[in-house]
Amino acid sequence: MSRLVAESLRKTYGRKAKTVAVDGFSYTFEPGRSYAIVGPSGSGKTTLLYLLSGIEVPDSGKVLYGDTDLTAMGEDARSRFRARYFSFVFQQFHLIPYLNAYENVSVGLYLKTGKTDHGRAVSLLRSLGIEDPNRKPYEYSGGEQQRIAIARALITEPRVIFADEPTGNLDSKNSEMIFRILTGLASEGRTVIIATHDLALAEMCDVVLRLRDGKLVGS
Amino acid sequence: MFFRLTFSSIRHYAFRFSLAVLGLAISVASLVYFLSFGEGARRLIRRSVEDFNLQLLVLPPAQSLTVQPLLPRSLADSIRSLGVGKVYSILRLPYTAGFPPRAMGVVFGRDFSSSLRFISRYEVVRGRDLRDSTVREAVVGEALAKALGWDVGDTLTVGTGRYIVVGVVKAGSPMVDNAVIVPLNLLMEDMGTDRLLAVAVAPPPGKTEEVLSLLKREFPGYTIQTSEELVKLAKSFVALGDAIRFGLSSIALFVTAVLLFAIMAITVQERRWEFAVLRALGATRWFIFRLILAQALTVSFVGWLFGASLGWGLAEVTSRVMVEKFGLDLVEVSPSILILALLVSLGVGLVGSLFPALSAVRMDVREGLGR
C-alpha cells in the first residue's frame, strides 16, 4: 500500500469571477488510516475528494500515489488508474436503477478487470447484510442502498476509498453503521477518506481534517 | 456486463426505444419493399436473356429500346444474304384482354423461315406446339391461359385474325408465360403491318465480333447491339429506378435518423449522472462512447429485423397479387437487399447516436454527479 500525497493543490471555478474551491492544500494520507474531511458547505470538501481521486485535475499542485503523479496523466489513464486503485461512495448512492444489487456491485469489478464474479459479489453483499442480491435498488432501504454502494466500491479491492457525504441521506442509526463499516476498512490496510459535515461521526475516523474556504485549517 | 448494461438500459427506457424501433422498422420496410421491385426487374431481364436466343440484335435507327415495329421486313432478307449465321425476324406486340384489362401479355410472331429457335426455352404442358406457318393456330403461355380461362381448342382474336389454341406452354419466365405465339407471317397480315420490331442474328461460334463489325459496316444507320449491351442498358434503367426509389425511402430514413437522434440526446441527457458515476468508478470515455453506440446499434438491429420482415411480407403479398392478376412477378427480396437495409439501418443508428455519444464523452464528471 502506498501513500497518497497532495502537494499545494489549488482549484478554482468560473471564468471571470473565479471561485477558489481548494487553496494550497497539502497533506499526506497514510495507508491503514481513516480520514474525515469536515467543514461547512462550500468549504471545498467534495472538490478536494475529486482532486485526490483524479476525477478532476488541479489548476496547480500535484497528487501523487506512490511514485505515480495523477496530475500528469491523461483523462483515460486516470480513469484506468482509478478503476485499479481507488473507489468511490456517494451521498446519493448512485446505484444504476435498471441493474439489480448483484449487477450494480459487478459493474465496479467489470470496469477494473473486464470480468464479473458472481460468488464474490454475492458473498460481499451478504457480509454487508444484503441477503437478496436480485432486487432493483429502489426495492431496498436507504441504508441498504448505501451498503450496496460500499460493496460496489469494495469488490475491486481498492487501496483508497473516497466517500462523499456517505451518510447525508441516512438516519442516525444507518449513518453510524455505514461509518463503522467504512472506518473498519482502514484496519485492512486501506486508506479511507470521508467528506462529511457530521462532526460526531467524523470523530470515529483516525484523523479529522478541517477545511474552510478551501484551506486546511486544522487536523 | 457490457451487454447487460446495454440491454437493461434499453429495457429501462422501453417506450422511447420502441418508438425508435418503430420508426426504423417503417423506414427499413419501405426500403426493402421499394427495392424489391428493382430486384424483380433484374430477375426478369436475367430470365429473358435465358429464354431468348439473343446474341446480336438489329434495331431501328438511333433507337435502342422500342415498342413500335419500325424495321422493314426486307431487312431480315438483306442480313440473311450476307451469310452471317441464323437470322430471325422478331415481331412482338402488346396483348391486353378486356377493359379494364383482365390480363396483360404479349403476342410473339414465330418466324418459321428461320432455323433459329428464338424463344429457346419453353415446354408444351397441354396440346402441342405450332407446326405450320399457314394455319391460324396459337400456343399460349400458361399464366395468361389461366388468367383468361383459355385452353386447347378455344379461339382467340389477334388483329383481324382468329386463332385456335393448340397448346399451352410454360417457360417459368413472365414474358413467355404471358405470351400468345402465332406464325409471324399471319400475325403481320392480321395486324396490317409489314414492319418488324427487330432482327436477331446468331453468328456461327466464335464469329460474333466479326459479324458485329460487318453488320455495323453494312447497315450504318441501324442500332446493332449485343445481348450483353442490351442487358447492361436494361439494368441501367432498373438502377435508375432503384436510385429514385431509394431516394424516396431516404426521406423516411432521414426522419428516423432525426427521431433517433432526439431520443438518444434526451436519454443521454437523463443518464448524465449514470455516465458520471461510471466514469468516477473508472470507466474510460471510450467505454461510455461504446455503450451509447451499442444501444443505438441494438435498436437499429431490432428495427431492421422488424422492418425487413414487414417489407418482405409486403413484397410477398404484392408478388402474389401481381401473379394472380397479371401473371407477372416483378417483386423479389434478395439477400443483397436485406444486407443493404441492415447496413442502412445500422448507419442511421450510428448517425443518430454519434453526437449524443460525443456529448456524453465530453461531459464534466463533476457536473454529472450533481455538484
Image (cartoon, coloured by chain):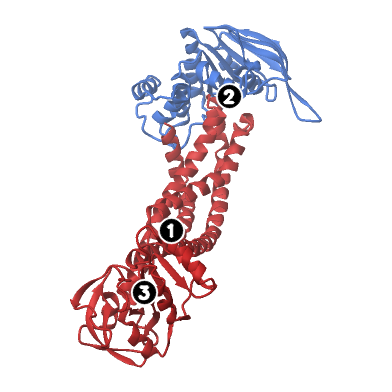
Chain colours: A blue, B red
Residue appearing at x 47%, y 73% in the figure: B59
- Mark 1 vs mark 2, CA separation in Å: 42 Å
Can you say whether B36 is above or below B199 in the image? above
Q: Nearer the viewer, residue A112 or B293?
A: B293
Residue appearing at x 47%, y 66% in the figure: B214
Where residue B5 sits, quadrant-wise, is top left
Chain identity of mark 3: B
Can you say whether A4 is above or below A127 in the image? above
* Residue pointed to by mark 2: A76
Disc 2 residue type?
A: Asp
Q: Which is in the foreground here, disc 1 or disc 2?
A: 1
Residue B356 numbered mark, or none: none
- Mark 1 vs mark 3, CA separation in Å: 40 Å
Can you say whether B243 is above or below A78 in the image? below
Q: Position of residue B316 (x, y in %)?
A: 34, 64
Determine whether the residue tagged by mark 2 lies in a helix, strand or loop: helix
* Residue pointed to by mark 1: B32
Residue B88 numbered mark, or none: 3
Residue appearing at x 41%, y 52% in the figure: B336
Determine whether the residue tagged by mark 3 lies in a helix, strand or loop: strand
Q: Are marks 1 and 2 on the same chain?
A: no
Q: Residues within 10 Å of mark 1 (few under 14, many from 20)?
A: many
Q: Are marks 2 and 3 on the same chain?
A: no
Name the side, left or right, on which B122 lies relative to A182: left
Q: Which is in the foreground here, disc 1 or disc 3?
A: 3
Q: Residues within 10 Å of mark 3 (few under 14, many from 20)?
A: many
Q: Residues within 10 Å of mark 2 (few under 14, many from 20)?
A: some
Name the side, left or right, on which A83 lies relative to B333: right
Disc 3 residue type?
A: Tyr
- Mark 2 vs mark 3, CA separation in Å: 76 Å
Regarding residue A151, the answer to whether it shows in the image is yes
Q: Residue furthest right?
A: A16
